[in-house]
Structure formats: C-alpha cells, structure tokens
Image (tube, helix red, strand yellow):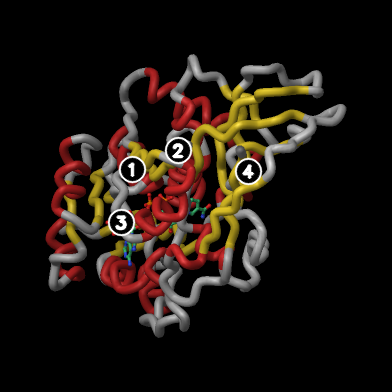
Amino acid sequence: MNKSINLKQRPVGTPTLADFDIIELENNLNVSEGEILLESKYISVDPYLRGRMSDAKSYVPPFNVGEPISSGIVAEVIETKNDKFKKGDFVSGLLQWKEKQISTGEGLQKIDKSKASLSAYLGIVGMTGLTAFLGLHEIGKPKKGETLVVSGAAGAVGSVVGQIGKILGLNVIGIAGTDEKIDMLKSEFGFDYGINYKTTKDMKAAIKEAAPNGVDIYFDNVGGPISDAVLFNINQFARIIICGAISVYNKTELPMAIAVQPFLVKNSALMQGFIVSNYAEKFPVAMKQLSTWLGEGKLTYKETIVEGFDNTPQAFLDMMNGKNKGKMIVKV
Ligand SMILES: NC(=O)c1ccc[n+]([C@@H]2O[C@H](COP(=O)([O-])OP(=O)(O)OC[C@H]3O[C@@H](n4cnc5c(N)ncnc54)[C@H](OP(=O)(O)O)[C@@H]3O)[C@@H](O)[C@H]2O)c1
C-alpha cells in the first residue's frame, strides 16, 4: 500500500486538518532505467510550508490544490535502476509527502547514518542548522562579548543560533513561549537568559533588564510585537537578521507595525532578510563546522518526533502552535 498527503484546499488564517487529504494510492510503482524507488523514513514539517499553502508570490512556488505537499524528507532506496544509488542507501532532499515514490535522484544528497542520526539531516546537520549558522555569521557578524537576542529560541533554528552564540563568546538571550522552554534554553543549550513572551507584560522592559548594555545582534524568527520590543533596545551598529516571521504567517491581513526606520537611522543599524538557499556555496564549510562542534560536544540538539505518516498534518499544525521543542519531525 502507498499513501500521499495532498493539499485539499488553501488554508484561510490558521490551517486545520480539513485543509489536508490523506489519499490511498495504488501500489504500482514501476522503476524505469535511471530511477530509484524511495521509502520515506523521516519528514520535516517547517513554518515556510505555511506560505506555500497560500497562493502568494514568494521565493518558493505555492503548492497546487489537490496535489501532494513536499518538504525535506529522509528516505531509503528500496529499489534502484540508477548506478549512482544502491539498495539500502539513505538520501535526503525535497520530496513529496508520500510513503513511497519514484525519483531520478536529482537534487537528493546521499547521507551517512554512521555520522549522524537519520533525522538529524533534517535539522542540526540539515536545513535548520545551516540557517542558524549562516544567518548568524553572514548577517550577524558576531564578535566576542556582544549581546545576541534570539526569538523563536526553543525551536529548530533558534536553539542552534543561541548555542553558536555561546560557542563564539556572546551573551545570549532567548525568547520563547513557555516556562519549560525557557528552562530548557538555559539548562540544555547554555543561554544566559530567557524571556517567556506569553507571560511577560512589558517585553521592552524585559529585554532591557536582560540586556542592560543593549542588543548588538537580533536573530529574528518571529516578527511582530516581540521584534518591535527588541528594536527599542538595539545598540549602535546593531545587526538584525530577518530569518522568519512566524507570528504573521497565519494572518489574513498583514498587521500594521511600528516604523523601523528611526531605530535603524539613529543606531546606524542593519536589518537584512535572509534565505538560506542564497548561501548554497557556503553549505559545505558550514556543515563541516556544525559537524565538528557536534562531534566535540559543543553543540547539541533536540527533536520532537511524531510517529506515523498520517500524523504529518497534525505535526505541522502543532509545530506552528509551539508544541515542539527543537526540530519537529515525523517518523513515518
Ligand atoms: N529564511 C530561511 O532561510 C529560513 C530557514 C528555516 C527557517 N526559517 C524561519 O525561521 C523560523 C523558525 O523556524 P523553525 O523551523 O526553527 O521552527 P521552530 O522554531 O522549530 O517552530 C516554530 C516555533 O515558532 C514559535 N511561534 C509560533 N507562533 C509564534 C508567535 N505568534 N510568536 C512567536 N513565536 C511563535 C513556536 O514556539 P513558542 O512556543 O516559542 O511560541 C514554535 O515552536 C520561522 O519563522 C521560519 O520560517 C527561515
């Protein structure tokens, strides 16, 4: 048997299970010359998929209604007529939400499960690890002793940004949505300070208390009022990495925000959008450093694993809702 998860309709506002269809497919996949048959093992659910469910222009095209959703997937080669792959190889890449599928192998990377766990290739040694490393280095330009604020700090990207900040000798403040996450930031990831944005009434004052000397780097995963509060605390020559804006992904209309220009002018600060795929030529160097730090025990990671292919849509909804600690992944 084979199954596929399709976009049933474009979500309006917050997505629900009704926006997805689980379709039973006939198990008649015939591998032609040059092709491989893949069995999905781990599926990544990511905030950017929300954007692809809408019919809006972005850096990746929207999903089509009635067709499978795709995301980062780790899969096993179970049949091959392609010399580059043998049976039992594991690959990672952008694939469809299907239990089994045929591929030419184009765009897929072979992965080595003796170097890292299979699921880690969707997180710490995959797209989210690269995002953390490259966003912080390329735009944040961190210098020892500086103060870094990270929003979405307990998630896949944020938890790695904060740890890299500590490795580089920064003072690191994380913002997240539960007390349990704040404890985790400090006890497991070595953050110096944590702020629960859901229970803090005055975020501007809380950031000032956490960063009495001001904020030099802000790694922004969320946008909205949290980011406004950080702006009030930036230092001269601050760097602001706009990595994501999850607080607005489900909004049907873009909210009015404070004007950022006075903060940027007054502080000669830099605010720059970041898309990890624009830095593809730097992936090998970044990956090598992430793997080295992992091997040395300087970097650690957390995963929230949901079991069962059919639970992929729910895992996506839960991640958008903050139910994950670290990387949200589905074990098929
Ligand atoms: N630009 C790129 O190349 C790139 C690549 C990867 C990811 N990203 C972006 O980076 C961000 C984090 O991605 P991720 O994969 O690491 O996801 P994640 O942080 O593991 O999961 C999403 C988290 O967002 C938080 N959240 C949800 N609604 C929120 C709100 N209204 N305000 C504040 N926080 C909210 C939740 O944590 P709480 O419990 O703390 O609310 C949730 O756990 C996203 O914005 C994503 O789009 C960008």
Disc 4 marks which amino acid? Leu
Q: CA distance from mark 1 to mark 4?
A: 20 Å
Residue at the disc numbered 2: 123
- At 69% from the left and 43% from the top, the residue drawn is 26
Residue at the disc numbered 3: 322
Q: CA distance from mark 4 to mark 2?
A: 14 Å
* Image quadrant where residue 280 sits: top right
Q: Are marks 2 and 1 in contact (CB under 8 Å)?
A: yes
Disc 2 marks which amino acid? Gly
- Label 4 SS: strand
Q: Earlier in the sequence, mark 3 or mark 2?
A: 2
- At 84% from the left and 28% from the top, the residue drawn is 34
| Residue 94's disc number | 4
- Label 1 SS: loop
* Image quadrant where residue 282 sits: top right
Q: Which sits in the foreground, 103 or 244?
A: 103
Q: Position of residue 200 (x, y in %)?
A: 14, 67
On screen, residue 217 versus residue 205, left or right, reads right
Q: Position of residue 159 (x, y in %)?
A: 32, 43
Q: Are marks 4 and 2 in contact (CB under 8 Å)?
A: no
